Image: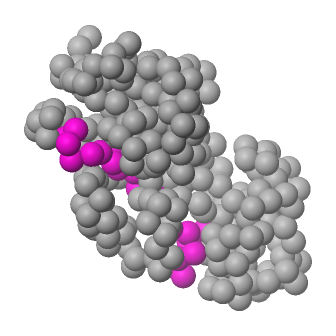
């Protein structure tokens, strides 16, 4: 907990100086662009409604930010529902669908003194992608189509893909895919798209809100046997903070979440490659009428 407190202190508050001010809602984000964008969207929309916020960006991994919430060092942070169930609640059996996953996670939070507000329409989940040209040429539209391909496809993914259920373990268990059926090349995040385009790899592990997916050059393979968990995002907030700030807090956060579809999140992630998350959020909220002009 000392480490978590030090991390929070080092992050700095983007919403103002009042870490000591009990009236401020303390929001945290994880340490990657999408989480920072969503944190800024929630923060700026709340401030526009008169809710004082202390935003702590880049708090850390799921384990670190969960500990900060549990120790009341934060009041709220945006969390992916699949990650919440798997990494925080240690639930390995996957619910049948996104609604079931949300209801299960919401019940778990209620027992722990937290509330899970409305989920976003977008789900930033793992997926396997191919070039559209490859899909047409090889008639590949589903992960289930991969085992019969000859010559065997080359899959590009990060090293941890080899040891995860959302990787080789799941492909073998659910689809019967094993090493003779394909070859895996270690590919750093972001590098999989140029490698797909050059033909160095045939299939790549991607995230469904990657900005590179804008434009239709790639096809996401369907996953009928569900090795990849849905990852809709929802504000995870303490009951005490929700009660303290009243209905406007929940109303504002839910209004922002409702706007975040997959195409919107892809576009916001693309804009964050040129501007800061704060600037991206400001422009979006003004365009949607959730912040004054």
**238 or 134, nearer to the observer:** 238
Colour mode of the rendering: one colour
Residue 245 image point, x, y percent: 15, 32
| Residue that appears at 71% across and 88% down | 176
| Residue that appears at 65% across and 50% down | 217
Q: Which quadrant of the structure image shows residue 191? A: top right
Note whether 151 is above or below 19 in the view shown. Answer: below
| Residue that appears at 21% across and 47% down | 239
Q: Is residue 34 visible?
A: no
Quadrant in the picture for the C terminus? top left
- Position of 21 with respect to 208 (left or right) is left
Magenta span includes 226 = yes
**46 or 265, nearer to the observer:** 46
Residue 146 image point, x, y percent: 72, 78
| Residue that appears at 59% across and 60% down | 126
Note whether 120 is above or below 110 in the view shown. Answer: above
> Which residue reaches farthest left?
247
> How many marks can you see?
0
Q: Which residues are magenta?
A: 221-242
Residue 120 image point, x, y percent: 34, 50
Magenta span includes 131 = no
**14 or 132, nearer to the observer:** 14
Q: Which quadrant of the structure image shows residue 212? A: top right
- Position of 114 with respect to 11 (left or right) is left
Q: Is residue 272 visible?
A: yes
Residue 222 image point, x, y percent: 56, 71
> Which residue reaches farthest front?
2
């Amino acid at each position: 907990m000392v480490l978590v407190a030090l991390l929070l202190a080092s992050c700095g508050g983007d919403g103002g100086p009042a870490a000591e001010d009990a009236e401020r809602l303390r929001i945290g984000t994880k340490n990657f662009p999408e989480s920072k964008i969503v944190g800024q969207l929630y923060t700026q929309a709340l401030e526009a409604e008169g809710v004082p916020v202390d935003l702590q960006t880049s708090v850390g991994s799921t384990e670190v930010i969960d500990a900060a919430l549990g120790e009341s060092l934060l009041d709220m942070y945006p969390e992916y529902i699949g990650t919440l169930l798997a990494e925080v609640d240690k639930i390995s059996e996957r619910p049948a669908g996104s609604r079931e996953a949300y209801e299960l996670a919401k019940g778990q939070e209620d027992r722990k003194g937290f509330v899970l507000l409305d989920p976003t329409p977008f789900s930033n989940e793992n997926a396997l992608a191919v070039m559209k040209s490859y899909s047409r040429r090889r008639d590949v539209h589903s992960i289930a189509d991969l085992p019969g391909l000859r010559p065997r496809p080359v899959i590009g993914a990060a090293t941890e893909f080899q040891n995860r259920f959302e990787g080789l373990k799941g492909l073998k268990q659910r689809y019967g895919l094993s090493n003779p059926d394909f070859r895996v090349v270690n590919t750093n995040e972001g590098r999989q798209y140029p490698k797909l385009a050059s033909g160095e790899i045939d299939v790549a592990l991607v995230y469904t809100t990657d900005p590179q997916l804008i434009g239709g050059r790639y096809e996401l393979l369907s996953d009928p046997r569900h090795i990849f968990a849905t990852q809709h995002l929802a504000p995870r907030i303490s009951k005490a903070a929700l009660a303290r700030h009243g209905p406007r807090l929940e109303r504002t956060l839910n209004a922002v979440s409702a706007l975040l579809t997959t195409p919107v999140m892809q576009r916001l992630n693309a804009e964050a490659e040129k501007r800061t998350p704060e600037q991206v959020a400001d422009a979006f909220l003004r365009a949607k009428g959730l912040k004054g002009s």
